[in-house]
Image: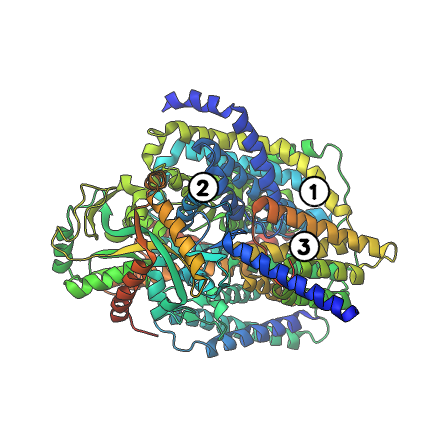
Amino acid sequence: MRKSTSDLVAAVFALALSGLFFLNTGDLEGTGLNYPLLILAFMVLCVLALIFSGLRARQRAEDGEARIDAEPVAVKRVLIISAASLLYAIFIPILGFYAASALFLFGAAMVLNESKVRRLKAACLLTAIMCLAVWAAFAKLLGVPTPEGLFY
Amino acid sequence: MKARFLAKMLLVTAALFLAAGGVSYAKYPEKPVNMIIAFTAGGSSDVQARIMQKYWDKHVNQAWTFIYKTGAGGAIGFGEIAMSKKDGYSIGGINIPHIVIQAVTQKAQFKLEDFDYICQVVNDPQTVAVRKDSRFKSVKEIFDHAKANPGKLKLGLVGPNSGHHLMFVDVKKKFDFPVTEVFYKGAADQNAALLGGEIDVMFGNLNDVMRSLEEMRIVGVAAEKRNDFLPDVPTLREAGFDVLSDIRRGFAAPKGIAAEHLAFLRDVFKKICLDPEYLKDMRVAGQPSEYLDGPDLLKYMISLDAVVKAAFPQK
Amino acid sequence: MNEFFMPALLNLCDPLNIFLMIAGLTGGIIIGALPGLTATMGVALMVPVTFAMDTTSGLIMLGAIYAGAIYGGSNSACLICTPGTPSSVATTFDGWPMCQAGKADKALIASLLTSAFGGMVGVAFLLCLAAPLARFAVKFGGPESFWLCLFGLSTIAVMSSGNMLKGLVSGAIGMLVATVGLDPHGAAPRFTFGYYPLIQGVEVIPAMIGLFSFSQVLYLIGSYKPYIAQYNPTPGAFGQVVRELAGKCKIVLLRSSLIGTLVGMLPGAGGEIAAIIAYNESKRWDKNPDRYGTGIIEGVASSECANNAVIGGALIPMLTLGIPGSAVAAVMLGALLAKGIQPGFKVFTATGDLAYTFIFSQFAVNLLMIPIGLLLIRLMVRLLSIRLTFVAIAIVMLSVIGSYSIRNSVLDIWIVLVFGLIGYICNRIKLDSGAMALGIILGPMIEENFGKCVSLSKAVDGSILRVFMDSSIAMLLIFLTLLSLCTPFILNRKRRHAQKHL
């Protein structure tokens, strides 16, 4: 990604967010309204400046511009862990914390482990250790309640 | 053959379940009871509940599991109590008038009818406090000064839409009290502002002003009679200002728990509240205790509801 | 006053108290090191336990947990770039690059030693200057706090000197997101987008866990590395670190611990702000500011030193005025009140036994922290020899349960995930997640104090400017903020100057 491209993407992202908030001001009034409006105004100013500088940088150096992505990224793995985490969050209130965690730990460890040696054993080990450790620390030692669901 | 066997098994299981159910009914509670606290761990509400727990453990062999559901000035936690399972294993602490005001002004997820009230345990009166080196020695001096210099006197409140705010609305309705009011997030900020001289006067709970008593002068208590903690401080009524205001703490369960459970809970809480050891602990912790049973608490809240509706715009 | 010293020291030698200090420290360090479990939670959870002890022992244990947890946060900050407590956000800036360069042991030892040093300085102020400092702390009213927060925000300009515009946008996004929840002025739901639980607002800690921990998981999983970082233990690392700290870091250490103590005293401002301000001040006054962020010991030192100095600072107004200087101090105040101890200047005379035992125990705790910390560091660096995938998956689980247990809300789990994705995307498009975190932390404080100033202005004929510039402290802070905003230009000049002389 070129630097100016990242500038423009960031500007669009910020602009979209401020639009979303602006449309939701509803029936707020007084300082409770003015304060977010102040931030929005400031943000829009910055975004305009960002767009301006991004476009200018683009004009100045069509291809001589520095590129900023340094490291290669395994996009597939990032998507898998994101999806797994989302499913995890959805299932916690349904299944209960420990059941959902065991599924998540085991599933993610099986899918994401790149070495083929003793995969099953490693996944089981991770699941058992983490669930036991968290249970011992939270439920037993600290007495903190965990989300409940169908199972424990 | 197989079908009959299965049917038998089913019957036996069902009977077992019923029996188990019956037994558990007899010796409620048979597992820890969830105690929902709407404020942060270590806060006044939490400390009070922890003191109660000590005595609960004497009467009941199942402990409380504390669950902190904080946010939105308590509204999140109160909503959680109202919406929790009606199996008698979820109860929680409520604060009055917060809960009444929130039901009126905040689109909160609960109404007064959504709870079965167990009892009231604390009645923490509002006080009028100034800095120790302040020139105000009495409530009358404060009111006179405010009248003589409209808008110049700075009054600190916790809020908005709190017990403090309710008292302020009441005072403004009854007397000519033109001041500049400033709201603080909590009692600690309010105390700091008074000590730092940002505000001249504040309305604060007894329990909260006690923390910085060394630096403050309490000139009036908004209660019917003088308080044991401050026997020398006159009530507002004695000073000629008929204002009553307090913050109360109580316990409640979601509406519709079994009558036996509610009766059991009310009974245990009453025993605790009359225990002299408990009263001593509460005194040490600076919590002004006052017991009121469930039905009386509800009656008080209904009367308060009318006051709140008159004071605040409804949403 | 001196008559309490000897009995207090004798109290400390009680085996039970020594045991409580060691146990509290160990537990605190572990709680701090786990992402999601914060110092506030660790202390709050142990408050009921203190009900069964005598007041002094209980307070000693809470203090030990507090100190341990604030230090412990640096372990995960250095090793996996995940602040274990919000206070150690700034530790990641240099601790993580050090770890990646194979110098994990040095980073950890440096954070341990500087934490202990900062803690001692804070307590020394508590012991010697409690009364005048407490008087000073309450002078920070609405306008002063407002400008202090703006000064904190202005450090964005230093942090992201490479691209100030993007830093500002990130900070504004953070402040905007922080307005979600209950409007503090009208007590009406604001920006809840029709979803009631959002009235709870965006809690700082889950947002930070998301921005830093979860996004770090995504980064680690996406990198093609088998392990988090190479680890080459340096023989004699301890001696080297001591020499470096005592040599070139002297001024950094002193300045950071002063900043920590001062910020800690102020009600509302806690360790996370102190650490970030201290880090940026170190960077600003350095001869070659560009070194910061590349993995230098001064960066770790300034952040860790400041956040531990906050402890002593936060206890000053708590003990003398009953006004807690941080969230943890508030919890400890609750524990004290439950025992019937009245805070006040009397605390040093009427209950001097308790007060001095507690203060001396804090010195002892900071000393004990060094051997215990060294022992735990040996265990913690083992983390680097576990396969990265497993570490990453485990962090997800810990982040989820840690954020949930802060206020038992499923909403917070979602906040972690959403902010994690935002943080990851922001890193890709070079928005500054550090600046965003600063916006989320400072946003609500700025709004609250802004509201106070608006209210106060009614007493001075509606002129908010007069409120803003009311006191000399406020004027000084305005000046500092302006100076801070000019820093990028000064840094540029320094850079050019340095190049010329090469």
Q: Kindly identify the residue that appears in the image at 36 percent across and 41 percent down.
A: B278
Q: Kindly identify the residue that appears in the image at 79 percent across and 69 percent down.
A: B1
Q: Chain of mark 3?
A: C
Residue underneath mark 1: C380
Residue A33 - label = none
Kindly report the distance in space between the C-alpha atoms of the residues bearing marks 3 and 2. 41 Å
Image coordinates for residue C86, horizontal then vertical, percent: 55, 51
- Give the amino acid at mark 1: Met
Q: Chain of mark 2?
A: B
Dot 1 falls on a residue whose secondary structure is helix
Contact between marks 1 and 2 (CB within 8 A): the answer is no
Image-based side of C369 in relation to C184, left or right? right
Residue B58 - label = 2
Q: Earlier in the sequence, mark 1 or mark 3?
A: 1
Image-based side of B209 in relation to C482, left or right? left
Tell me: residue C197, above or below residue C107: below
Image-based side of C80 in relation to B112, left or right? right
Image coordinates for residue C105, horizontal then vertical, percent: 70, 40
- Give the amino acid at mark 2: Lys
Residue C158 visible? The answer is: no
- Give the amino acid at mark 3: Ile
The quadrant holding residue C215 is bottom right
